[in-house]
Image: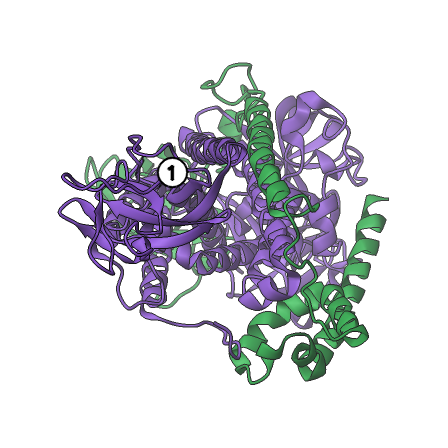
Amino acid sequence: MAETTVAALLDALGIHLALGTLAAAALHLRGLAVIDPSTVGARPGFRILVTPGLIALWPLLILRWSRVHRGPDPEPLTSLPGPDHPIGPRRLRRWQAVSFPALLLFALLGAGVALSGRTEPWDPPPTGRAGEPLPLAGFEDALSVRGVLATDAAPVSLALLGGEQEVVATELRVAGPLGIPSLALYWSPQRPPAGADSPGREGLFVGRVPSRPGTHRLPPPLAARSGGGAWILYSIAQGELVAILTPTTGDGEGGR
Amino acid sequence: MSGPYRAVHWNRQKRIYDRVLLLGVFSLLAGFAALTAWGRRELTAETIILRSTAVTALLLLHLALAIGPVARLDRRFLPLLYNRRHLGVTIFALGLIHALIATFQFHALGDVNPIVSIFTAYSSRAGSWEDPSRFADLPFEPFGALALLILFLLAATSHDFWLRNLGASLWKLLHTGVYIAYAALVLHVSLGALQSEQGPAGALLLALGALTLGTLHLLAGRREARLDARRAELAAAGFARACRVEELRDGYGCTRRIGAERVAIFRDGDRVHALSNTCRHQGGPIGEGRILDGCITCPWHGWQYQPSNGTSPPPFHEVIATYPVEVVDGEVLVKGIANPLEAESPGAPCTPDRGGATGEEPFYIGYQPTAAPAIARRCRALVLRLAILSFFAVVWLALDQEPQAPGTFEFGRTRTFEGTLVERPLPLLRIDPPEGVDGPGAAVVLVGFGKQGLPDFARGHHGERVRFDGTLIAVGALAMVEMNDPESFVVLGEPESGEGGVEVEALGSITLVGELVDTKCWFGVMRPAAGKVHRACAIRCLSGGVPPGLLVRDGRGGGAVFLLAGRTGAPLDFDVEWAGLPISVSGELELHEDLPLVRVATIEPMR
């Protein structure tokens, strides 16, 4: 119902503006010179400047044009009315004196009610109090490992635990929230050639990379336990090799 | 003063005005945009333009509305009023940019005419118009549209052509519509941006601006009312307007007819005196004389009279009549009935306050090449103070913006995706790991161009392997693809038996409370992608078929989005106007590869 009404009003506005365009053309060609001699010889800049107004308010100008046709006196539509005229200066001043404070009061009242009724972005809080974790007890591990709670891009580093000759675990350190979807860690006995877009046929899946910041342990593939090879970050959704990590042992840092 | 119209009658003062204005506008826009881009990197460029134009336009509107009463209270600020129409047109231009981008961003490319959407996106919901306690849920967009319409009419009719042809009163009445525009904008901001931006800057500055404007208008109005009352009182007592104080040079006079009498009016320092214009000697015109040695001196033969009582200085005995005189707001009023002869008449003070000009006070004329130094100094000082205040307001507003969860939208870039298309329960693409490589696959949500769900060209291919070009949208580890290239869509056939399906891991029953959002915007197309300012866009997206999501926040600025689907594979039954509102969802939580999805058993709005 509302959509139909608004659409009908828009159609009416469209017709008004279409007629306004025709009226503006007629006014530029003939009417303006009749109703206002100062438009004769006016520069194009003036004509461009008044055209939007002519298109919008064309009935007023056409009315004035018709009045000029009926009589020789091209008075403005409101010819300096006296103080007690409905839109004379005195009434106008009174209207200003009353209307602005009234409008301001109305607007401030509305703003006050609107602001008092606003809700916090997390309102109502899922657990009843702001500052508490998501109500995901029992699900957090599954969700965080899948990266549900993660965002943005940040460096990832890799540490191999157990020494270079015998890797017993890999420790991924995500320094900040990641912005790369479906990120997985692969190991390959060979470093992929430059320009490669996947871990290669020999790539072995190690685990999904949690995009939540923190330290995450992943068991290495058997073939990787003797050390060597390349540790590869690959985005399955993007189909892109994101980085080849240089692992460290102990507390050393790796880089993307 | 008439001749052929020109777009603008340029002169030096107008050029200075416009340069200062443009410099101010550019500084405010650039300052806000730069601070936002630095402090809130997650916001998209459209949002930055939207906010910087809005902040700048609103600041300038406050200035435009303040100039009138300020100039009435102190006429030395009249230069600021001189070219105010350019200020008004600039405000409209900024508002138009804001409106065009907002309309395109939040309402276009959906299933409803964007202009219709502005007025109807969520106006029909119970709890909005009908329930006063939910006033904050009222749509804010129509108030902005009303303000823009009024600002357009004011800008379009700002040329003198309109003043002449509409007539002064109708033109003035039309232009007082700026007050309605201002009130509409206060509501637009309060019901819109300030619902999402919870920091103190926006609300406090808006209240401060409104109170300042209200105070200035009340002060100016009170002053005008007092002057009007004084004029009326004097008129009732028989006083008539004679001239303005600035028409009188110190020590000189002029002649005016008051009733049946000709009266000479003189200015002597800070007082104005009115005396008979007829010299007692030969009837010489006293008003054409001047004050010498403290006495009014007739121009014909130098006969002299003291201004305060009309008597000649001793030892002479001639006397002329003096008249009661008053000065109201720089206007000299004289009573047509003379004082008793020789009665002391101190005259009227002619420097009553800052607003009353005197002959020594500089008078501003805009088409002169330079303003009087005193006026120029005063205006420069005020503009400088306003610039500093505006600078701090913009900095505060820019730094007080709510942080948003970062997302990625690779706008303008396409990638090729290949995998198994799944239409139920939600449109997904299951992407396999690289060929020959061990490991899991990934699931990405599929949407169409603009505010559309799965496009028609991709429908009817459930379970088939497909390849197409699209644009990646990602938040955290979750990904979505906008299928915007129908030509690239190729069906590769059925997947091999047992492969290609989305791995589903059931996690159990769950009940969550959060905000209903459209996942396309939340995944990264827009920032902000939630809250009141985004509500209409979310409604359009959900109405167009974009998968719904439940944004659950943790109260620490973090949160997660859960895809929502019907329990039995059927489309989720919900009202799109719940978008942007808190809702409660119960159902079964599942992981579809990477994607958390709730098969909804019950969904209901919290208010």
Q: Measuring 80% from the left and 58% from the top, which residue is drawn there?
A: B460
Give residue B480's position: percent from left, percent from top.
58, 51
Q: Position of residue A250 (x, y in %)?
A: 20, 35
Amino acid on which disc 1 is placed = Val
Chain B image colour: purple
Say which chain tag 1 marks: B
Picture layout, residue B244 above or below residue B579: below
Judging depth in this view, the residue of B554 and B260 nearest the camera is: B260
Number of marks drawn: 1
User: Residue B295's image quarter?
Assistant: top left
Label 1 crowd bin: few (<14), some (14–19), many (20+), radius 10 Å: many
**On the picture, is B568 further left or further right than B390?**
right
Q: Position of residue B591 (x, y in %)?
A: 61, 36
Label 1 residue SS: strand
Kindly tell me whether residue B486 is visible in this rendering. yes
Query: What residue is disc 1 on?
Result: B325
In the picture, the quarter occupied by the C terminus of chain B is: top right
What residue is rendered at 68% in x and 73% in y? B487
- Residue ID at (53%, 54%): B95
